[in-house]
Image: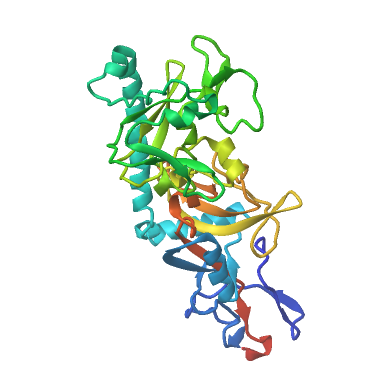
Amino acid sequence: MSRGLPIVAVPLLSWIVTVLIAIDSESLTCPPGFSGSEVFRCSRGFVNVSGWCFSFHKEPTSMLNSSDICHQQGAHMVVLDSEEKEKVLTKYIEKMNFFNIYQERNELFKIAQKEWDVETEKKNFCADYIKHGVKSSKYRHIPNAKIPLGSLPHQRANLTTPPGFSIKLSSLPGAGMGAWAETFVPKFTILGVYEGLIHTVDRKDDFYSWQVDKQGTDGTYNIDAEDPSCSNWLRFVNSPAKYQQENVIPITCEGIIFYMTSRDVEPGEELLVWYGDGYGRFLGVNRIHPEVDLNGSFAFRANVLTFDNERLIFDNWTPVTYQNWNPNDEGETAVDPIFGLLLTYHNDGRWRWVTERNYTYYTGEDGLKLPFICEDSPFYLEPEECSIT
């Protein structure tokens, strides 16, 4: 058979008998011409699906926990090594209407909606700024504090801190000084303009720079706030380690970088803004929302894949040969050597593979929790238990 099922040798007749795997408690009898006990069957907790033994775990759990549970069952996660096998599996999922399985993604959907709303507000702000400048009746602009005469140049950035804010040690390990709110700051408040030297040279250590598109051209320039004598207090706003800490967003408008609060900020909270994926990689933080990859699709975790000498291998250490990646994915979006393989059903009625990346910025340390599938090899009884009829 094409799926590599176990083969039973019958010495009495010197020929090979092949049979299907039994459905859990409903086992198949001996081959034609024989009688007796069952030959092949699935272990308890597994069901036969056209010749394969699968176990469907409906309780959502994390990626590594999924693999551990399968191994504790003496099995492994499902090995999607052929189009035939995948079609059998997905048709069974559709037949059993597993789409009603709870997907622990409600809070993530809410976060995604908030971020879409914030993106809309950024556009609204820019349109308002172009029309009204800092004299807007809709947005509150907080100006820099006035710098006392005779101040030392290197004190400039700190001295521009407005009333109601302070610069003190950051809550993030190793981040140095941070910017803090001392009073309540409402959502969508404009904290100011990010100030710094303008240059067009990209440096790997540009940790205080924002890149801005030149107006009316294809070029870019950098606003570099590394030098405190040429910048303002917003240079002290650090980058968060998780979504719950994030409370400031950057807005590029008319070649200027504005900082705006993305939610209400309570007294005693540190101001934190995401500086971009490049700086995030430097910090070891990935700001990837699961719905960027899943896009609202139904998902089962099928396996945990590993890069091994530029090869992809399943969690049972067999190489990945058949593939069905979502367009523009092809497993290349993975940023970790170990990542999840998600079997997803989309609005167009098609099943596709999606890379499960590191979503802990949004989900917490456990990562994305999803239902998952284990696979086991069938077991068979000794051939002599069958007798000739």
Residue 341: tell me if it is visible.
Answer: yes
State whether residue 224 is above or below residue 58: above
Instruction: Work out whether residue 348 or residue 318 is closer to the camera in this orientation and state it.
Output: 318
Vertical position of residue 159 compared to residue 106: above or below: above
Quadrant in the rendering for residue 179: top left
Residue at 48% from the left image edge and 79% from the top image edge: 26
Where the C terminus falls, by quadrant? bottom right
- Please tell me whether residue 351 is drawn above or below residue 10 in the rendered image: above
Q: Residue 347: horizontal and vertical position, in percent?
A: 40, 42
Q: Residue at x 48, y 24 (%)?
A: 151
Q: Position of residue 29 (x, y in %)?
A: 55, 81
* Residue 31, image quadrant: bottom right
Q: Is residue 8 left or right of residue 116?
A: right
Q: Position of residue 68 (x, y in %)?
A: 56, 69
- Say which of 80 and 286 sits in front: 286
Front residue of 115/379: it is: 115
Q: Which image quadrant for residue 72? A: bottom right
Left or right: residue 141 versus residue 56 is: left
Along the line of sight, the residue nearer the viewer: 61 or 206: 206
Measured along the vertical axis of the image, is residue 26 above or below residue 142?
below
Q: Position of residue 321 (x, y in %)?
A: 68, 52
